[in-house]
Amino acid sequence: MQSFNFSAGPAVLPASVLSQIQRDLQEAQGSQTSILEISHRSATFQKIIDQAQKRLRDLMKIPNDYAVLFIQGGGSLQFEMMPLNFANKTGKVAVLDSGSFAHKAALAATAVGKEGVEVASSRAEKYRFLPSLPSDFDPADYDYLHITANNTIEGTAYHANNLPQTTGRLVADMSSNILAEPYDITKFDAVFAGAQKNLGPAGITLAIVKKEWLAEQTLHNVGPMMSYQTYIDKDSLYNTPPVFAIYALNLVLGWLEEQGGVEVMFKKHQVMAGKLYDYLDHSDFYHALVKGDQRSWTNVVFTTGDAKRDAAIAEKADKAGLHNLAGHRSVGGFRASMYNAQADEAVEALITFLEQVRKEY
Amino acid sequence: MQSFNFSAGPAVLPASVLSQIQRDLQEAQGSQTSILEISHRSATFQKIIDQAQKRLRDLMKIPNDYAVLFIQGGGSLQFEMMPLNFANKTGKVAVLDSGSFAHKAALAATAVGKEGVEVASSRAEKYRFLPSLPSDFDPADYDYLHITANNTIEGTAYHANNLPQTTGRLVADMSSNILAEPYDITKFDAVFAGAQKNLGPAGITLAIVKKEWLAEQTLHNVGPMMSYQTYIDKDSLYNTPPVFAIYALNLVLGWLEEQGGVEVMFKKHQVMAGKLYDYLDHSDFYHALVKGDQRSWTNVVFTTGDAKRDAAIAEKADKAGLHNLAGHRSVGGFRASMYNAQADEAVEALITFLEQVRKEY
């Protein structure tokens, strides 16, 4: 039976990457040592982490005045590190509350002793659309504006042509659409992403920060592990990094280069998610929860309008080899996550299944 | 050619664990999914993390009033979390400065806005022995006393029969000898250890904290990712954990159970390190840098007394299949790290090599 994994993350990895990992488990690159046993101070690993950084710079066209950093802790730790490192003048962080993770980022800014301010929110409307920056928003009142580029749970995205317009500093959580669609990195002052959706297995987080902005900061009571400057000074090797996760990330980036890079991925996502949205828009049984050009290309959320029926269908899908289609508990319904490594046939298999089920009801 | 890895960490893993990982890379435990792709919210992973916790409780005899937590960031992040969570009454942390990592812990406590106080230090004597608690040490002046149970770089250890005697709270960094020698966990109020020496690959850190102590605390400006209570409340699943690292840790713990547990490991280390110390003590060419019962059972540091000669011999050893024997740059000479998964034959091979080289000089 064919099997497809629509998990929102940790997500599917390319088959060629899994095969390479299997080989390197015996002996990594002529080192007489398993990739799980190599030292982070070895020449073998230095080559890997350097290559990962270079690949990210090439794929995302990251200029040299941005640092590319590898950090543990996931996006949630970035919710704390960003305000600790960058909310030092006004002490306030403006947040466009477009979903659960934006909301968490605002709360985290306040938790670390700064002030997270939701300058606009679509929470009351169940995050079915993106909040817009209020017309009276004054960037001078805040150290920066935080956005979630792609709302994994709610299935919306601030695409490159739809970014909030601000003359102030802009920070983006790109955890669920990094390298899946093109953004001009120079529009942002900092970007971060957990690896487990588009970049590799869970356990490593990417942060890209504008060095000139960081140089302006005076930090208070921030330890070395929570300071971006430490990661810059030590090339992300201040302490033992998650060697395997960085190694796997680097393999995924190599695969992505072979595929042709971000523009090719973007077309793939437009085709895949496009087919599913098209099917849903023409169905009178299912419907997409998000409308128009705010739709995510990586996370498609939909429902039949009946929570019990949705749950039964998701369970049936699982038995049919279409895994992890249940929506997040805060939204319900279905969520089909299709990141970079998702098989092209996955969406066809899903639509065929959905259509078959529809006929049975 | 036989090959042995004496790295101080990331270190050797059991061969059976590496084989199991290779198998699970195709499909983990009947899940139709690679271990690198399974969701942290899946039943498969819940079973893994529950089992890892249970195995740790069994192996270390951890009572229920201690929480067993899985956190990212390594020992270095624990250097910041411990004071943020526990230095709330006096705001001071007493540190026995027995090595580079104890010193870092003291600096980190100060960096996060508390005060790290080195109440005794052997730094001036190059950390060749362990500092003792001063006779006028008053635990009431500090929130807790921090010790490094085993000094990875310097090759000393506070063994179970040699722990500092204090009526106050005691926190131990056990990164390099956890599960390698027995400690009575109830002597400590918190213990932590990065995985990459005795527990598995790099990328996951274990923290064991006394819940009653944590309940006394009022935290200030500590975000959810830096608060132990979050990890307790969410069973270490507040956000996406490093799934693979926890899975690998659990396999290593399973292997350790099969071997017979901590007491068996302790005997193994006493035999292995014992043979090497014995050889060094009877040599007029090499000598161990640490004397007597403060010697580490996992990290043996030694020298010929000539830095250039040491470096040349370490390079020769590498070519002969004995890898990563160079001492840390702050100590020089040699360091043979032999953690739980080290092959019994490694020490024989090393002694044979050392003796052969000695004859050549």
Image: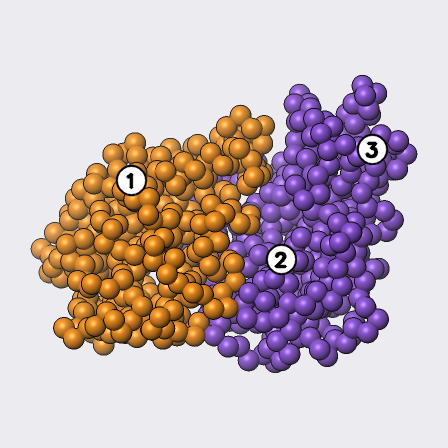
Chain colours: A purple, B orange
Q: Position of residue B234 (x, y in %)?
A: 50, 47
Q: Position of residue B175 (x, y in %)?
A: 33, 54
Residue that label 3 marks:
A286
- Disc 3: host chain: A
Q: Is residue A354 left or right of residue A143?
A: right
Quadrant housing residue B331? bottom left
Foreground residue, A316 or B26?
Answer: A316
Q: Residue at x 78, y 46 (%)?
A: A297
Foreground residue, B38 or B276?
Answer: B38
Q: Amino acid at mark 2?
A: Lys
Marks 3 and 2 sit apart, C-alpha to C-alpha, by 30 Å
**Mark 1 element type:** helix
Residue that label 2 marks:
A104
- Disc 2: host chain: A
**Mark 2 element type:** helix
Instruction: Say which mark, if any, is on residue B41.
Output: none
Q: Residue at x 49, y 36 (%)?
A: B46
Residue that label 1 marks:
B59
A326 up-or-down from B3: above or below: above
Foreground residue, A8 or A239?
Answer: A8
Q: Amino acid at mark 3?
A: Tyr
- Disc 1: host chain: B
**Mark 3 element type:** loop
Q: Residues within 10 Å of mark 1 (few under 14, many from 20)?
A: some
Residue at the far left in the pictured view: B282
Is any part of residue A8 visible from this angle? yes
Marks 2 and 1 sit apart, C-alpha to C-alpha, by 37 Å
Whether label 3 touches label 2, CB < 8 Å: no
Quadrant housing residue B253? top left
